Amino acid sequence: MTRPKSAEENPAKVDDGVLFRAAIGEVTLLTEQNHAPPARAPLAAIVRSTPAHDGSKDSLSDFSAASPPEEFLRNGIARQTLRKLKRGSFPIESELDLHGYQIDAARELLQAFLHEALQSELRCVRVIHGKGMNSKTGEAVLRRLTRNWLTQHPQVLAFCPAPIEMGGAGAVLLLLKRSATDRS
């Protein structure tokens, strides 16, 4: 029969804290003047956002040299992205209806809507501009201008006409840039 070993005979049973305190001896705290300051100040938090929408800052022009395209893809964006948008691969996260608005009011609403969508980091939205059937000249003014404004907005990566069940030629689906590094 073997007898159990004592703490001196079995080093695994000795408390590590006791050994550490015995090894380092007595400790004296540093005085306040001997503390070294941090190497550099802590960094401020970075808030991801786009500039606040200012009603006086209207950067979208009503005039263009050519008629705006039916579909649009920003330079540097893969053609496949536009195909995905047309197929409905991106869920629509919000929409804006511009029916019945005058041109200036529609432009301001569109800018405010895009600003809010970008703040919320929305990816795909729908803008309903109508087909122009009730216009006096028979021309779809808001349709043409909406597409023109969208080509000018730097955060719009792509747009295409909505599918028939979502408004067809009277609406447009937009793909928005989510962040500074977003390339698709």
Image (cartoon, rainbow, N blue to C red):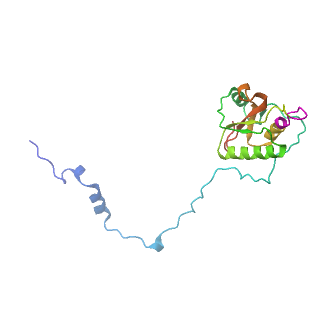
Give the residue displayed 15% in from the left and 49% down from the top.
5
Return the x and y of residue 95 as percentages of the image width and height. Answer: 70, 38
Q: Nearer the viewer, residue 112 or 30?
A: 112
Return the x and y of residue 38 as percentages of the image width and height. Answer: 53, 64
Q: Nearer the viewer, residue 37 or 172?
A: 172
Is residue 96 in view from this perspective? yes
**Which quarter of the rendering shows the C terminus?**
top right
Return the x and y of residue 75 as percentages of the image width and height. Answer: 77, 36
Return the x and y of residue 149 as percentages of the image width and height. Answer: 81, 41
Give the residue displayed 66% in from the left and 50% down from the top.
49
Instruction: Please tell me whether residue 97 belongs to the stretch shown in magenta.
Output: no
Q: Nearer the viewer, residue 55 or 175?
A: 55
Give the residue displayed 31% in from the left and 66% down from the top.
25
Q: Majority secondary structure of the magenta segment?
A: loop
Instruction: Please tell me whether residue 143 belongs to the stretch shown in magenta.
Output: yes
Horizontal arrangement in the rendering, residue 32 relative to residue 78 (left or right): left
Give the residue displayed 88% in from the left and 40% down from the top.
64
**Which quarter of the rendering shows the N terminus?**
top left
Q: Nearer the viewer, residue 105 or 136?
A: 136
Extent of the magenta region: 135-144
Write down the quadrant of residue 2 in the picture. Answer: top left
Write down the quadrant of residue 77 in the picture. Answer: top right
